[in-house]
């Protein structure tokens, strides 16, 4: 049963994507990286600085503001906003960009995230972040040695294993699949394929997470360009249409989400009707997913919560081969945060845009022209054949998430 | 404003205007686990906040709870992030479901609280003894004249429901 929800289906497009390299030593500022990524996305769209008049970015006190980035590129803005946020911001800001354009505030919006997540402000919470004073709501967790994302999420993962019998080996298949995909991605930080045994044999970080259940702290900047379908018609590239978007949808008691169980329920439970309702499709219609893989478990939890399998069946689903290239519905085909590099979600939307355009940047010699072999051996192709609809499942915390459905 | 409390390399800051936490910690220093009870609907809430999340009423009173509960979930930290916790690894952190207000006002809701699972001497409990379903009770770790952390220790009681521990 599909219910059409009022939205802006097919009226807005992503017309350009860009990024810097993924590294652990960018040796430049977030400002310089943002400028490179935004410039790359503008050029990818076939636009000039004059054509972009809106800018959105997200960060947590670790990056450069839009007014600097726009100025460096000679962009005069009719709308901009710097948003505090990490994961799940990408999809939410695409929705906000659509709203700003729909409201007549601007015409074309560049959305970026720039972070020296390894060399400057470590995303894992070590270094400067571990020394920050603790006050307010943080007093409910941080004094107990619960500071990093993995430490914050682990009780959710553990309870899922208790309630549904999910195993470490099942969830390890997420890393296995994403490493397979990264081996087809020249940009990926980790291109080596791993096995389930590699994952469960790696050292413990915070049980139930092994080292290889965790993503990679990365230096990187990424950008997307959003404009109206009308404007997109004049551009050189193939636009990708937004069918539905849900931004920062939350569980009750966001101050302390443990208070409102079941704690194994994640925000997708509330987001799925919004995003599928706008798009007028269901999970079975989706060809490619990008499910935020801060950890192997986050991908699994979201895929089941959005209905790609029954609740509690996520362990079996991700270990069935479905999420691998060549499977029915591959997930994170560029390798995701576990293998390509960590971007707070932006890279997974970029990858889905490229999948729908048919131009993923794999090792196929004529990839940019859309010529692919669909041979998923290491170091070859990662283009999904005839990808028509792609979905992104963005994760912030178990209790907050965003979602996006795109079509060719 | 009271001086920040230094604990394991962290500055714990409770400014004068943060009456929610200041009073919570003052009660904890007297070794009483107190939560706020809504003056209108009577429901208990944790952490201490300004309005009732069920009826939005601004009236409240501190109410003592037993500090007895069940481990609802847990984690074992092997790789500490905060420098002051590195010497404690591996240490368990527990999500405790308190006995008061379980399944209220809806079946999925409860008074849950995060703490370390410690032995009575305040050192981390051995990993082998940590499991979902085990019974715990609150103990207090004094940090300063005006602040103590509520922590948990295993209670000598039969478990509540199925006992489960991460295999391996």
Image (tube, rainbow, N blue to C red):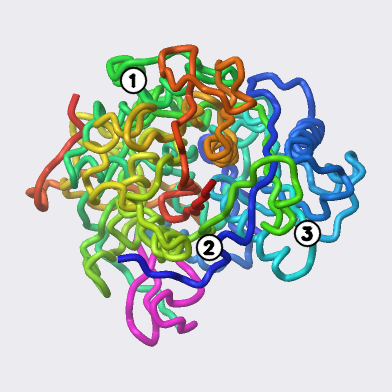
Q: Chain of mark 1?
A: A
Q: Magenta span: helix, strand or loop, mainly?
A: loop
The circle on residue B11 is none
Magenta-colored stretch includes residue A322 = no
Q: Where residue A9 appears, x then y in whole percent?
A: 55, 62
Coordinates of residue A296 in the picture (x, y in percent): 38, 33
Does residue A324 sit above or below B112 in this rendering?
above
Using the image, tell me which numbered label, if any, was put on residue A199. 1
In the displayed structure, would residue A47 be above or below residue B96? above
Q: Is residue B72 left or right of residue A79?
A: left
Can you say whether A7 is above or below B95 in the image? Answer: below
Q: Is residue B47 visible?
A: no
**Around disc 1, counting alpha carbons within 10 Å, would you say few (fewer than 14), some (14 to 19), or many (20 or more)?**
many
**Residue B22, numbered label:** 2
Q: Which residues are magenta?
A: B32-58
Residue annotated with mark 3: A107
Residue appearing at x 57%, y 48% in the figure: A134
Q: Residue B57: within the magenta? A: yes
Q: Earlier in the sequence, mark 1 or mark 3?
A: 3
């Amino acid at each position: 049963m599909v219910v059409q929800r009022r939205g802006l289906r097919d009226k807005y497009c992503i017309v350009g994507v860009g990024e810097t390299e993924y590294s652990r030593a960018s040796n430049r500022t977030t400002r310089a990286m943002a400028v490179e990524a935004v410039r790359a996305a503008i050029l990818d769209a076939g636009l000039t600085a004059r054509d972009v008049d809106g800018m959105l970015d997200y960060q947590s006190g670790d990056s450069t503001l839009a007014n600097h980035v726009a100025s460096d590129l000679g962009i005069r803005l009719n709308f901009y906003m710097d948003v505090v946020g990490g994961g799940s911001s990408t999809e939410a800001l695409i929705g906000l960009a659509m709203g700003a354009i729909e409201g007549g505030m601007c015409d074309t919006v560049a959305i970026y995230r720039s972070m020296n997540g390894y060399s400057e402000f470590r995303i894992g919470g070590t270094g400067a972040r571990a020394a920050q004073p603790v006050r307010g709501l943080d007093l409910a967790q941080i004094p107990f040695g619960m500071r990093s994302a993995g430490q914050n999420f682990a009780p959710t993962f553990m309870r899922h294993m208790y309630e549904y019998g999910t195993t470490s080996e099942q969830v390890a298949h997420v890393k296995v699949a994403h490493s397979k995909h990264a081996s087809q991605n020249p940009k990926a930080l980790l291109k080596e394929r791993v096995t389930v045994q590699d994952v469960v044999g790696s050292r413990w970080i915070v049980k139930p997470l092994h080292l290889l259940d965790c993503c990679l702290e990365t230096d990187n900047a990424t950008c997307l360009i959003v404009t109206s379908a009308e404007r997109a018609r004049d551009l050189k590239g193939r636009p990708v249409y937004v069918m539905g978007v849900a931004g920062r949808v939350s569980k009750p008691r966001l101050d302390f989400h443990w208070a409102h169980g079941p704690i194994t329920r994640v925000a997708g439970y509330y987001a799925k009707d919004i995003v599928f309702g706008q798009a007028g499709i269901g999970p079975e219609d989706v060809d490619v997913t990008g499910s935020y893989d801060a950890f192997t478990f986050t991908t699994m939890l979201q895929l089941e919560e959005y209905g790609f399998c029954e609740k509690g069946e996520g362990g079996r689903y991700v270990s069935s081969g479905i999420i691998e290239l060549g499977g029915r519905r591959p997930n994170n085909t560029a390798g995701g945060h576990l293998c390509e590099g960590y971007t707070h979600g932006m890279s997974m939307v970029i990858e889905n845009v490229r999948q729908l355009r048919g131009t993923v940047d794999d090792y196929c010699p004529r990839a940019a022209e859309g010529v692919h072999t669909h041979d998923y051996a290491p170091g070859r192709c990662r283009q999904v054949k005839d990808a028509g609809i792609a979905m992104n499942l963005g994760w912030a915390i178990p209790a907050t998430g965003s979602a996006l459905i795109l079509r060719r | 404003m009271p001086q920040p409390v230094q604990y394991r390399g962290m500055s714990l800051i409770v400014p004068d205007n943060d009456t929610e936490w200041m009073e919570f910690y003052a009660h904890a220093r007297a070794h009483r686990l107190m939560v706020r009870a809504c003056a209108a609907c009577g429901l208990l809430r944790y952490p201490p906040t300004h309005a009732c999340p069920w009826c939005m009423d601004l009236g409240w009173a501190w109410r003592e709870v037993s500090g007895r509960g069940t481990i609802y979930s847990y984690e074992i930290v092997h790789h500490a992030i905060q420098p002051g916790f590195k010497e404690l690894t591996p240490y368990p952190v527990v999500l405790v479901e308190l006995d008061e207000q379980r399944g209220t006002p809806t079946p999925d809701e409860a008074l849950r609280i995060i703490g370390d699972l410690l032995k009575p001497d305040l050192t981390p409990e051995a990993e082998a003894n940590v499991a979902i379903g085990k019974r715990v009770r609150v103990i207090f770790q004094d940090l300063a004249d005006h602040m103590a952390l509520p922590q948990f220790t295993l209670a000598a009681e039969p478990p509540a429901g199925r006992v489960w521990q991460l295999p391996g």
